[in-house]
Image: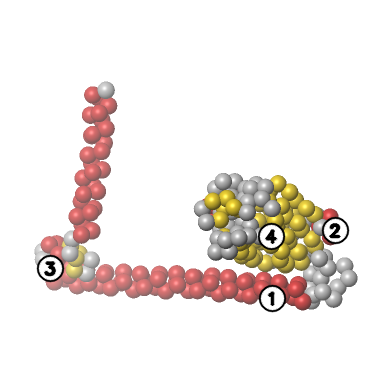
Amino acid sequence: MHVNNFMRHTIMRPIFIFLVLFLLSSCTPRIYGVPEEQWATLSKDEREQAIEHHQQMEVLREQRRFEEEKVRAEQERQQRLEMEQQQAQVEQIYAGERGIRGDLLRVTIHGGELRINGKHRAYKPVSFQIADGEQKIITFTHPKKHHYQTDIMINYDDGILSFDDEQGRKHRYRYELAYQPKWRRGMHYRNITLNKHSHSQARNIAIIVDAIPLPHRRY
């Protein structure tokens, strides 16, 4: 037991000393990247070399920052283009200019309870349309206390309808429904309960999905 403690202290001591020296050096005043005390001992030529090296490093850092900013700007531009294209496609589906039956849904959610203002409560039924490639935030309201509300993300993408489609850690708790031809006649999903860690914490809710005909189209 004593031997193990001795070995542990022997191993940890150099690490501790290294951390202390690192912290001290990071706090030491520097001149052109050289600790102030060391700078005082340098010759004129050594100082000129240190200045030149420091300037070269600054140029390289600036170039790296510039390149990273270019990459970020291009990524943001691509994301904007993708969002604009997706929004345009959604609008075309609503207008009946593109898409097939199943690209536009009528969704009704009713019954059961949702977590509203810290407790599980009843809510007013909601009904809305959603197109393939669209994401909507739907507000659910208590039937009597109208200031009791909760916003829930609904997403429809590539034939998958997702209820409570939160991003990040809660993303895996969403409830998914995959497209079925029966949606053309309407399908009623009952007794849907989500994980207690989900945003909505839905209990025994029902979702009706109806693939409505697209405007100006006959299929």
Please report contact status of discs 1 and 2: CB closer than 8 Å, yes or no: no
Give the mark nearer the N terminus: 1 vs 3. Answer: 3
Image quarter hosting the C terminus:
bottom right
Comparing labels 4 and 2, the label whose residue is closer to the camera: 4
Give the left or right position of residue 96, taking residue 8 as reference: right
Give the left or right position of residue 200, taking residue 158 as reference: left
Q: CA distance from mark 4 to mark 3?
A: 81 Å
Kind of residue sitting beneath label 1? Ala
Comparing labels 1 and 4, the label whose residue is closer to the camera: 4
Please report contact status of discs 4 and 2: CB closer than 8 Å, yes or no: no
Please report contact status of discs 1 and 3: CB closer than 8 Å, yes or no: no
Kind of residue sitting beneath label 4? Pro
Which residue was labeled with disc 4?
125
**Mark 2 secondary-structure assignment:** loop
Which residue was labeled with disc 3?
43
Give the mark nearer the N terminus: 1 vs 4. Answer: 1
Give the mark nearer the N terminus: 1 vs 2. Answer: 1
Q: CA distance from mark 1 to mark 2?
A: 28 Å
**Mark 4 secondary-structure assignment:** loop
Q: Is residue 149 visible?
A: no
Place of residue 6 in the rendered image (x, y in percent of width and height, measured from the top left): 23, 29
Q: CA distance from mark 1 to mark 3?
A: 67 Å
Which residue was labeled with disc 2?
185
Q: CA distance from mark 4 to mark 2?
A: 20 Å
Place of residue 37 in the rendered image (x, y in percent of width and height, measured from the top left): 12, 62
User: Nearest the camera: 217 or 164?
Assistant: 164
Give the mark nearer the N terminus: 2 vs 3. Answer: 3
Q: Determine the residue positioned at 40% across, 70% down.
A: 64
Q: Determine the residue positioned at 67% across, 67% down.
A: 134
